[in-house]
Image (cartoon, helix red, strand yellow):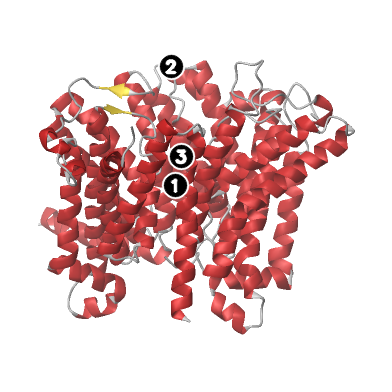
Amino acid sequence: MYTVSNAAFDALVFLAPMLPAAVGGLATELAGTLNIALEGLILTGAFVYVAAASVAGPIAGAFIALAVTAAVSYGMDGISRKAKADSFVVGLGINMLAPALASILSQVFFGTKGVVVVPGLQSSRVLESLSSTSFVGPVFGHRLSDYLAILVAMVIGVALAYTPFGLRARAAGQNPEALRMAGLDAGRLRGIAFLVSGVACGASGAALAASLGAYVPNMSAGRGWIALVAIYLGGKDLVGTVVASAFFALLLSVASGAQSLSVAPPELLMALPYFVTAIVVIAGSYGALRRRH
Amino acid sequence: MMRSIKDTGDSGVGIRMAAAVVTSVMLAAIAAVALSRQPLIALRAFFLVPFLSASSFLSMLELSGPLALCALGVVVTFRAGHYSLGGEGQAYAGALAAAMVGTSATSIAGPSAMLLSLGAGLVAGGLVAALPAAGKRFANADVLLTSILVSQSVVFAVDWAIADPLRDPTGNLVAMRSIPAASLLHRLAPPSTLTIIPFATVVLCLIAAFYFEHTRSGAAHDLYGRNHQFAGLQGFNTRRLSWLPIVVAGSLHGLAGAAMALGARGTAIRGMSGGIGWSAIGAALVAGSRPSAVPLAALLFSWLDSGSRQAVVLSDLPPDAGLAIKAIVIIVISARPTMAGVRSACARAMSRLRPGRRQAGQ
């Protein structure tokens, strides 16, 4: 029987890998240039986590995944700034490169371009005994990797809201000239925001792979794009982004749950969240336009 | 997320094309040597096999036709300042619509059924683009987000349609019934898959080039892409430009999907769009958003596809090498340090070397 409690539990499962990417992406948007490569970076994080963890264990694997995605993201910004490349185009390139490179490396290291299962890599569930608690039960009993991903998102959120870095990142986005006059380098701050975004996507990808204990080709499955939509729909505001991410997670959870209840084809149920989100984006934009006028 | 498009017709197309070709050749050679245990066979398969026989070359040329159509669509949106990323779903919907009409219009004579199928693809692609276009026109919604969301939902829906209600139950392939041969695009040089599509695409690209370079509407289109407020002040119809290029691009993608279904594939197959929307963005960037350069850029990308496919079959090169090379080419051609930037970087490097030289001299 599919209940509200099940829907809330599944929503948290969907939220855990999405939230860090959304909050990290918000950091880059506030710093002046949205990181469009969230999708590719999540996939990179997932593959590197599995590849590194298969050799060095899950903890080292997670740190290596975070380091690699941070380096890729920082490098992307470096290419945009130093070589005057369009950051949007570089982001698209990374989104194309990540699945292709993961497939090639998967073939080279694991001998398959399909699913890579590493025994012992699946993150364990914690606080399962509390999951039957009324009302707050769905918060408990998730995998440790999910909690850690949400922790990463919280740390980045706190950094954006309450630290000098957050303030300076906003200044870099809103008035880079003023920042320059204050003796700070707006470009460098943007680079740090991209670095943070890379770490966040690494956490998203690692959480995704750790929840299955495996790497599945294209396992990011549009989460990076939904994270971008959450940033936009949340009004480029931290609380708004978190609320929008939670909304999409709930939508995906309901669509996923409906597959077990409904006779409707699973493909159509999976199409629904994307279509509804597009309508929500247009309706939200229409509302904003009306308010401005 | 308001952006200015840098990749309009002012960029040096020749340099871009040369950079793209050189990068592709270098990366293909590196991939063959580094990733294959039979590097010589992989190199030969990548560089020579697509050109060795007339059939494989003409099939590669055919492959470039739908890609060029999609890339032309991307140019139309980019030059209007819209970042539409929904090409994949638009092309896939076009293929489905064309196959539906092609398989059901059996009572109509061949060429008419074929034209009707192409028209269905054109309309289907335009319809998929209509929602993001309406969102832009009436709500100023970000096309980048809405186009990719709608495209993703369409991909799921078309996957279902091909795999379930429209699937040919007699075949093992997840595909619709084959379109009757009389309704397919005529093959010009069998056994190659070449049809009229690549040539028609060249004509369309030339028409688009004329539109952008020599017509007032084209100038308005470009101006809107650079500064829509200024275009409005000049008295151009900015309302129309806020949605029409998105729908036109959708139609071109739909037409490309229809060309695939009526050409080499002969029906709609699950997953047949195979990243054409993303490759088209790359081809449009390589072409510097110049319609006249689009066919060449598409040919370069179709060589990468054909070459990597041949290398996969004839050697042990990983199947995604071609896609990885295309992605790196996109990143490389997007980087364009100015000559002043290159000079100052050289000067900095020289100044770092000088103290070392002095010490060496002492």
User: Rounded to the nearest whole Å, what is the CA distance between mark 3 and mark 2?
Assistant: 42 Å
Residue for badge 2: B38
Q: Secondary structure at mark 1?
A: helix
The percent coordinates of residue B334 (x first, y second) are 45, 54
Q: Are marks 2 and 1 in contact (CB under 8 Å)?
A: no
Query: Is residue A222 visible to the viewer in this orientation of the structure?
Result: yes
- The residue sitting at 65% across, 34% down in the picture is B63
Judged left or right of residue B96, residue B185 is right
Residue for badge 1: A273
Residue for badge 3: A270
| Quadrant of the rendered image containing residue A12 | top left
Amino acid residing under circle 2: Gln
| Quadrant of the rendered image containing residue B113 | top right
Judged left or right of residue B95, residue A159 is left
- The residue sitting at 43% across, 20% down in the picture is B39
Q: Are marks 1 and 3 in contact (CB under 8 Å)?
A: yes
Q: Is residue B186 above or below residue B65?
A: above
The percent coordinates of residue B44 (x first, y second) are 53, 22
Q: Nearer the viewer, residue B235 or A151?
A: A151
